[in-house]
Amino acid sequence: MSAFDLVLRNGLIVTGSDQFSADIGVSNGIIVAIGTGLPHGTKEVDCAGRWIMPGGVDSHVHLDQPAPGASMCDDFFTGTASAAAGGTTTVVCFAWQEKGQSLKEVRDGYLARAQAGARVDFAFHLAITDPTDRIVEEELPALIAAGDRSVKVFMTYDGVRLQDGEILRVLSQAARGGALVCVHAEHHEMIQWLTAKLVEAGLTAPKYHALAKPMAAEREAVNRVVALAEAGGGHIQIFHVSGAESAEEVARAQGRGRPVTAETCPHYLVLTAGDLDRPGFEGAKFVFGPPARTAEDQEALWRHIRAGVIDVISSDHSPFRFDDPAGKKVAGDAAPFHKIPNGIPGLAARLPVTFTEGVAKGRIDASAFVRLVATNPAKRFGLYPRKGTIAIGSDADLVVFDPNKRVKITNALMHHASDYTPFEGYECLGYPVATYLRGQLVFDGTRVTGAPGQGRHLPRGPYLAPAPSALLPGG
Ligand code: URP
Ligand code: ZN
Ligand code: ZN
């Protein structure tokens, strides 16, 4: 009888803190041994010349979600195929409430669909768009206590955004329950006013999306929600920080000791507002919010990443098809920018693009890369050390990564349901060559081998210290 179900041999193990050569022994989906000369396993894999890193944790993924008039094209089945193909073994998705809906019923529906379709493990952010008394005071605390320990609020988008007073109530309730609040921070009225002015002037091509959503709108909203969280209490994470000025707001909040963290995404590191100006309607492929900014913003983001101000790189996978009346062309193939659905697919590109821009280009070291794409999101969202590291007792979510493999991104390699990738033609140096979920191969370097229903829900125990209001006596 073999000592292990699986042994990965001779790889360079790269965690968020260490790099060393050793074998990994896996039994019953758990890492049970790390050492040299381990006894034989039922399955043996030689990883010489490769890295073994913890499976990626993508803490910002939209799957099976409604979008006004349009439809996102990835459900849990196709979206988690893309995750596995990109070296991601845990996705934190959204249980997305629409007006009038019970958050509990919404979450139960997402849970059932994810349990049927997902090929990697998953958890949920509770996206609150209708914060009635019953939702905020009854359903939210019950769902947090049951393990869905993160909440998403929007400061913009009609039908979705919350008013400041509503955000305060959610912040305060989340703080009491020990849930992190993730924030889409953009100034709604400023965007509406600029959009109206641009449309009035006939400036409606996709490139004007960037002018309608300027950095001032993002910077102001980050500043405001940091202040709201100081009053309401609680930990917040600013989602999709797009450039220098909003990152500076986060850095200032952290300098004052506020519990504020931030993520950015690969598209902010490699795309610019110039991509919206591609010929014809091609720019629609790059419509997402906040928009991509400038090359200087990209370098500023890396400075803030190196300083730890931004400590997570997620995909914000929000997939629409391009050539589809339910996708980017929902309002026609010459639609004005404000009628183009916001969002792009990015799950499978996250690790290779971050590695190429970060490690291959000398901006960060190997362990910093692992922290950004796996360890830190696992910690921020209460999944560590089960996820996000290679340690005895952790789930055997393992990625065999070839740091020397050159791959030019094509849509077929993304294994998603979209008909395009915004990273088409991007030259990666470094690519995942195998992905294991709890010791089972879910991507073999070419094919997604994970089965629907293989992914498990990850309820999260309490993990955040209370962060009381700084502005009320006694918090
Ligand atoms: O453009 C984006 N990011 N769409 C997805 C929804 C969101 O804002 O996270
Ligand atoms: Zn957002
Ligand atoms: Zn998003």
Image (cartoon, rainbow, N blue to C red):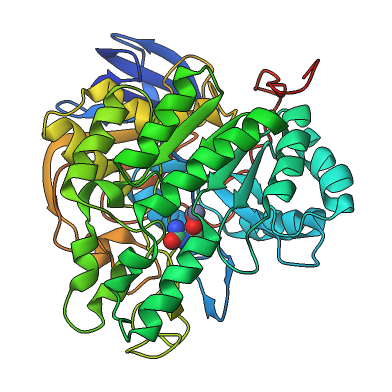
* Percent position of residue 210, x then y: 32, 64
| Quarter of the image where one finds residue 22 | top left
| Left or right of 188 on screen, residue 252 | left
| Quarter of the image where one finds residue 224 | top right
* Percent position of residue 176, x then y: 78, 28
What residue sits 38% from the left and 67% below the top? 212
175 or 371: which is nearer to us? 175
| Left or right of 26 on screen, residue 299 | left
| Left or right of 254 on screen, residue 455 | right
Quadrant location, the C terminus: top right
352 or 213: which is nearer to us? 213
What residue sits 25% from the left and 74% below the top? 283
Residue with the most extreme top position: 36
Q: Relative to residue 30, is residue 65 depicted above or below?
A: below
* Percent position of residue 474, x then y: 81, 15
Q: Is residue 454 visible?
A: no
75 or 391: which is nearer to us? 75
What residue sits 24% from the left and 36% below the top? 300
Q: Relative to residue 177, is residue 66 depicted above or below?
A: below
Number of marks in the rendered image: 0
Q: Relative to residue 201, is residue 96 depicted above or below?
A: above
| Quarter of the image where one finds residue 106 | bottom right
What residue sits 42% from the left and 38% below the top? 263
Q: Can residue 30 be seen in this view?
A: yes
* Percent position of residue 318, x then y: 45, 61
| Left or right of 201 on screen, residue 64 | right
